[in-house]
Amino acid sequence: MRNLNLKIDVSDEEAAAIEAELRSGEFACVSEMVRTAVRTYLDRRHLSDTRSIARDVAHYRQEIASRATLIEG
């Protein structure tokens, strides 16, 4: 895994939420939380892209079907 060091500024409220998550034991460190958040973000983006592609394919198929009807009719 390639290491990329980041420095981010967070509000006091965000820092408190991060610290609370760490105390809960779900995450071992802030890096683990950030990696999980980035994966979740990328998964959502991919899902949106997949939905967009599915809509485009459905539209394309409708166009082809309507043209075939015009030619056959």
Image (tube, helix red, strand yellow):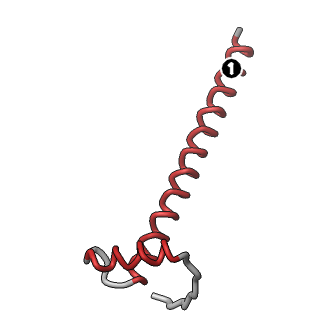
Picture coordinates of residue 67, whole percent (x, y): 72, 21
Q: Is residue 70 left or right of residue 22?
A: right
At 25% from the left and 77% from the top, the residue drawn is 25
Q: Where on the picture, by quarter, is residue 68?
A: top right
Q: Residue furthest front?
A: 12
At 54% from the left and 49% from the top, the residue drawn is 50
7 is higher (above) or lower (below) than 47? below
6 is higher (above) or lower (below) than 45? below
Q: Residue furthest left?
A: 25
Q: Is residue 48 left or right of residue 59?
A: left
- Label 1 crowd bin: few (<14), some (14–19), many (20+), radius 10 Å: few
Q: Nearer the viewer, residue 60 or 37?
A: 37
Q: Is residue 35 left or right of residue 54?
A: left
At 62% from the left and 30% from the top, the residue drawn is 61
Amino acid of disc 1: Ser
Q: Nearer the viewer, residue 39 or 53?
A: 39
Q: Where on the picture, by quarter, is residue 6?
A: bottom right
37 is higher (above) or lower (below) than 65? below
User: Disc 1 marks which residue?
Assistant: 66
Picture coordinates of residue 30, whole percent (x, y): 41, 83
44 is higher (above) or lower (below) than 36? above
Q: Is residue 24 left or right of residue 2?
A: left
Q: How many marks are shown on the rendered structure?
A: 1
Screen quadrant of the N terminus? bottom left
Screen quadrant of the C terminus? top right
**SS for dot 1:** helix
Picture coordinates of residue 48, whole percent (x, y): 56, 50
Q: Nearer the viewer, residue 48 or 26?
A: 26
At 54% from the left and 91% from the top, the residue drawn is 5
